[in-house]
């Protein structure tokens, strides 16, 4: 796995190790993973995925069969550093696909709702639709989807992927995306009973609890290939929510919680360029996708898990 120390990798590594064996999952990143947890620790390698030689060396040495390619710059950071985002998001993916072609590895590639743009239908964005994103993140995600499709059809590489919505999790902090508010709000609700949100209160976006995202990745990678019509870039979703709605849900557990708004024009513009919701019918039909957490179940679990980790500020 590349980018294994990030928000998704911090939970996908232990999940894969539990399923396939601790020593059979090689975590790699350019920074060390977070503090050791109770989960058994397996192999970790320094790997900069913009370096083809480093990708190849780890794949060769460990006889890797599948690459989970998570390393990327996320939407808000990519907008502040577009050249670096192109270099990492496209350069890293290209090296991964080339090595996968040569060493016959399967590949998992996480695309995003950021792969859509303002001309995509805004409600229930279809699986196959117009994709003209206006952010560098979106440009790299659409290009990534296309080059994955090319390696699948031209070279027979088994590349599978999801268009993930904003992910909500309590293990590792988010890495600079537009949907980060939906994680920060929980930390601030517990610590300060107050959160200042950088998106407008009525900004509807699709989200998913990390437990569902991990299950989706494992399920897609194990899906029967003959049933997959799309194989890559599947829309998946679980929760459709606005900051106002999330605050209302949190208030059911933390009645004194207050939300106010200081809108960041850059992140608001990114959110406004994305669909309000997506249609995940293809994932449901082709590999039986079905989320377990709605907004109420996710909120309850987030507050319980974070409540044991954080102390309220005095
Ligand atoms: N988290 C979300 O809400 C979300 C939603 C949709 C799609 N995705 C996609 O999922 C993937 C993982 O997202 P995440 O939230 O875990 O990201 P993250 O920012 O939390 O983690 C990315 C990791 O990549 C590492 N990295 C940076 N440069 C690298 C390099 N040159 N070589 C190797 N590693 C490098 C970072 O150190 C970091 O640990 C990304 O492709 C992202 O676009 C995430």
Image (spheres, rainbow, N blue to C red):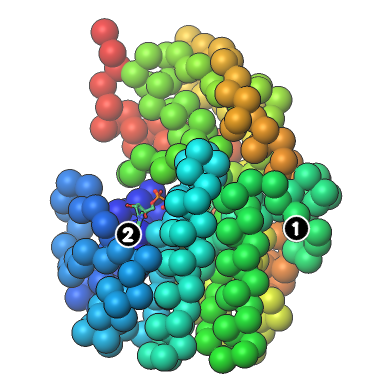
Q: Quadrant of residue 143?
A: bottom right
The image quadrant where one finds the C terminus is top left
In the image, what residue occupies the spot 16% across and 62% down? 41
When the figure is inspected, residue 310 is found, relative to residue 227, above or below; the finding is above
Label 2: which residue? 4
In the image, what residue occupies the spot 43% across and 20% down? 189
Label 1: which residue? 131
Disc on res. 205: none
In the image, what residue occupies the spot 21% across and 84% down? 61
Say which label, 2 or 1, has the lower sequence index: 2
Please tell me how crowded label 1 is: few (under 14), some (14-19), or many (20+) other residues with Cα within 10 Å: some
Please tell me how crowded label 2 is: few (under 14), some (14-19), or many (20+) other residues with Cα within 10 Å: many
Q: Is mark 1 within 8 Å of ligand 1?
A: no
Q: Is residue 287 visible?
A: no
Q: Is mark 2 within 8 Å of ligand 1?
A: yes
Q: Position of 26 compared to 247: left or right?
A: left
Circle 1 SS class = loop
Q: Quadrant of residue 188?
A: top left
Q: Position of 22 compared to 64: left or right?
A: left
Q: Are marks 2 and 1 in contact (CB under 8 Å)?
A: no
Give percent across and percent down for residue 114.
63, 50
The image quadrant where one finds the N terminus is bottom left
Give percent across and percent down for residue 78.
51, 45
Give percent across and percent down for residue 71.
40, 59
In the image, what residue occupies the spot 30% across and 64% down? 48
The image shows a total of numbered marks equal to 2
Circle 2 SS class = loop
When the figure is inspected, residue 165 is found, relative to residue 70, above or below; the finding is above
Q: Nearer the viewer, residue 123 or 109?
A: 109
Instruction: Report, in whole angstroms, how far the alpha carbon at label 2 lies from the one at label 1.
Output: 28 Å
Q: Nearer the viewer, residue 123 or 131?
A: 131
């Amino acid at each position: 796995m590349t980018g294994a120390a990030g928000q998704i990798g911090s939970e996908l590594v232990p999940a894969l190790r539990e399923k396939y064996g601790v020593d059979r999952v090689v975590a790699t990143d350019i920074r060390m993973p977070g503090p050791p947890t109770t989960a058994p620790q397996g192999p970790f390698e320094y790997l900069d995925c913009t370096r083809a030689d480093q990708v190849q060396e780890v794949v060769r040495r460990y006889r890797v069969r599948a690459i989970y390619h998570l390393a990327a710059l996320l939407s808000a950071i990519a907008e502040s550093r577009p050249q670096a985002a192109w270099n990492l998001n496209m350069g890293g993916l290209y090296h991964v696909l080339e090595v996968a072609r040569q060493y016959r590895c399967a590949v998992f590639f996480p695309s995003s709702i950021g792969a859509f743009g303002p001309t995509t239908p805004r409600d229930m964005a279809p699986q196959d639709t117009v994709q003209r994103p206006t952010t560098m993140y979106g440009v790299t995600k659409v290009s990534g989807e296309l080059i994955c499709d090319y390696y699948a059809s031209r070279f027979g590489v088994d590349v599978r992927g999801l268009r993930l919505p904003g992910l909500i999790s309590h293990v590792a902090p988010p890495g600079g995306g537009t949907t980060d508010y939906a994680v920060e709000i929980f930390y601030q609700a517990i610590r300060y009973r107050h959160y200042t949100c950088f998106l407008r209160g009525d900004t509807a976006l699709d989200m998913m609890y990390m437990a569902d995202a991990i299950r989706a990745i494992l399920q897609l990678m194990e899906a029967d290939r003959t049933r997959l019509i799309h194989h890559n870039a599947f829309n998946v979703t679980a929760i459709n929510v606005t900051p106002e709605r999330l605050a209302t849900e949190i208030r059911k557990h933390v009645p004194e919680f207050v939300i106010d708004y200081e809108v960041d024009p850059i992140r608001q513009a990114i959110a406004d360029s994305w669909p309000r919701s997506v249609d995940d019918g293809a994932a449901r039909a082709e590999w039986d996708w079905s989320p377990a957490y709605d907004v109420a179940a996710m909120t309850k679990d987030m507050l319980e898990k974070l409540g044991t980790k954080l102390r309220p500020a005095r």
